[in-house]
Image: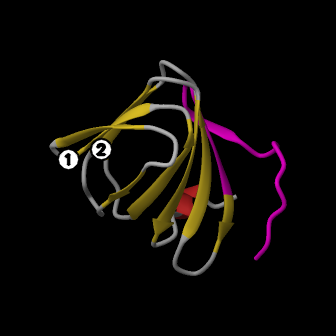
Amino acid sequence: MFATHNENGYVQPVEGIEMKTLVHGEKSLLTRFKLTKGALLPSHSHPHEQTGYLVSGRMVLHIGDESFEAGPGDSWCIGEDVVHRAEILENSVAVEVFSPVREDYLP
């Protein structure tokens, strides 16, 4: 599967957070997030491992009992069923891989 870059196809699951699935295979899915300063991603968990990379901006990630202020170039991995949330400190872009594929993120 290939995808070319374009700004179409984003959805807004939470105010201030836009997401777009870029590509997916049988076992993983790649998503791009555009995050607006001041947005809050509420606490949640899911049965997918989630690995992320912050392309630009700043945010505070709360994963389980740990908190981390992420900046450009920082990365993280969230285990399956681990409660996590985020506070967006600056307009940001992140890319994340989910495994197994999140059916609810398929285009």
Which residue, given by chain and number where applicable, does mark 2 sit on?
A: 84
In reply to whether residue 9 is colored magenta, the answer given is yes
* Vertical placement of residue 5 versus 56, above or below: below
Residue at the outermost top position: 38
In the rendered image, which quarter contains the C terminus?
A: bottom right
Residue type, label 1: Gly
**Looking at the image, which residue is at 62% across and 77% down?**
25
**Looking at the image, which residue is at 25% across and 47% down?**
83
* Vertical placement of residue 87 versus 93, above or below: above
Residue type, label 2: His
Residue 4: image quadrant is bottom right
Q: Nearer the viewer, residue 18 or 88?
A: 88
Q: Secondary structure at mark 1?
A: loop
Callout 2–callout 1 Cβ contact below 8 Å: yes
Q: Secondary structure at mark 2?
A: strand
Can the viewer see residue 95?
Answer: yes
Which residue, given by chain and number where applicable, does mark 1 sit on?
A: 64
Disc 2 to disc 1, C-alpha distance? 6 Å
Whichever of callouts 2 and 1 sits on the residue coming sooner in the sequence is 1
Magenta residues? 1-21
- Point out residue 13 in the picture as x, y percentages from the top left corner: 55, 37
**Looking at the image, which residue is at 52% across and 69% down?**
101
* Vertical placement of residue 91 versus 84, above or below: above
Residue 46: image quadrant is bottom left
